[in-house]
Image (tube, rainbow, N blue to C red):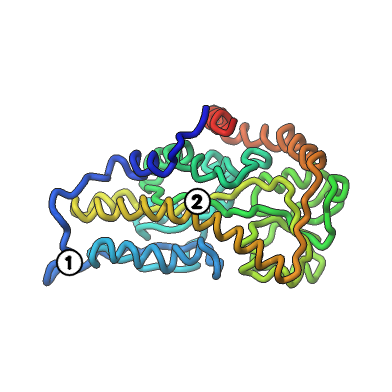
Amino acid sequence: MNFVNNAKTRALRSGLLMSLAIAASTAFSGVAWGQESTVWRFAHTTPIIGTVWHRYATEIVPQRIEEATNGAVQIDVITGVVQPADLLASVREGTVQGGSLILPYVGATLPTWNIMTLPGLLQDESRYPELVNEILMPHVREDAERRFNAVPVMFFANTGASWFSNGPIDSFDKISGTKYRVHSPELGQLVQTAGGASVSIEFGEVPAAIQRRMIDAYTGALPSANAAKLYEVTKYAENWPAGLGGNIYVISSEALESLPEDVRALVVAEFEELNLEIQQASLDEAKAAAENLAAEGMKFIDVPQAEREELIRLAKENVWPLWLQNAGPEGEELLKSVQEALN
């Protein structure tokens, strides 16, 4: 099965919030005199300053939604207070009206949402927006509304997925005995299967952990490594299959439904545009990060294809079955759909 030729047109036609996107019959003029704006508390769970992920959550989305509604809806961003594992429950309970979530943090409990993290599944990152808009967004939307009373309004990826070391670790046998900080459960399983050790620490602790020899290497995304100036403690970025971590911004279904019909239509339309925009911005960000990392002295290692294929084989034989066991029949069907789309 091939993707549609124009993913953007298809995504806009279907809409992120199809059930809620009711066109306003008259132009919206903003907040009337004497009325108060609707204020949404938006929990930004993992601040990574200098990234598209952080900038859109804290600056662009609040500004664009306020402008689109002429001040009728305002977003109050709360940074680093709600933990990733608690976000969806907080939205369901009404503690906050929305928030940001890096999906690998909840990959163990929501495996189907995090399917792109399977090593070797998506080998051309430039195709991820089509995959998200055509297959993953509808699946996550249905699940999120049913289980958490939440609507995913933006879905994008941490592009530039790489392995980093002071090696270089450019052959399969060099992974053995290496201590890695990994950014997903699936990569932790893969590293251990290949003979390495998986260490669980927060991303912000990586520089100190490298310097103290608590870890030898780590996996992550080029923009995050660039923003954290990890070129100061590591020399090499290796293109081992790393999977692709996803990110979502969600808004409470109740919060959306409580808006006047015309305001809701404006919010929905703006989020649709923002979704497509941030997907392209994430791809551009990875390219810019790679250029800056190289300028700062980091060397990019093109791992021989035979070595890459060996690790992918190991992932499919050992990591994928564990994911399928956790994801169940629903995950099996989703994986088939994704594989058909990528062929």
Residue type highlighted by circle 1: Val
Residue closest to the eye, 28 or 35? 28
Residue closest to the eye, 291 or 100? 291
Q: Residue at x 56, y 60 (%)?
A: 285
Identify the residue position indicated by label 2 in the image: 156
- Secondary structure at badge 1 equals loop
Residue 202 makes an appearance in the image: no
- Secondary structure at badge 2 equals strand
Q: Residue 9: x percent and y percent?
A: 38, 42
Q: Residue at x 74, y 32 (%)?
A: 317
Q: CA distance from mark 1 to mark 2?
A: 31 Å
User: With respect to residue 70, does 274 lie above or below?
Assistant: above
Identify the residue position indicated by label 1 in the image: 31
Q: Quadrant of residue 19?
A: top left
Q: Residue 163: x percent and y percent?
A: 73, 54
Q: Quadrant of residue 204?
A: bottom right
Disc on the earlier residue, 1 or 2:
1
Q: Residue 189: x percent and y percent?
A: 72, 44
Q: Residue 206: x percent and y percent?
A: 70, 66
Residue closest to the eye, 96 or 46? 46
Residue 266 makes an appearance in the image: yes
Residues under numbered marks 1 and 2 in contact, where contact means CB atoms less than 8 Å apart? no
Question: Which class describes the residues within 10 Å of circle 2: few (<14), some (14-19), or many (20+)?
Answer: many
Q: Residue at x 84, y 45 (%)?
A: 172
Q: In the picture provided, is 61 more to the left or to the right than 46?
A: left
Residue type highlighted by circle 2: Phe
Q: Quadrant of residue 210?
A: bottom right
Question: Which class describes the residues within 10 Å of circle 1: few (<14), some (14-19), or many (20+)?
Answer: some
Q: In the picture provided, is 329 more to the left or to the right than 258?
A: right
Say which quadrant the C terminus sits in. Answer: top right
User: With respect to residue 6, does 27 lie above or below?
Assistant: below
Residue closest to the eye, 137 or 194? 137
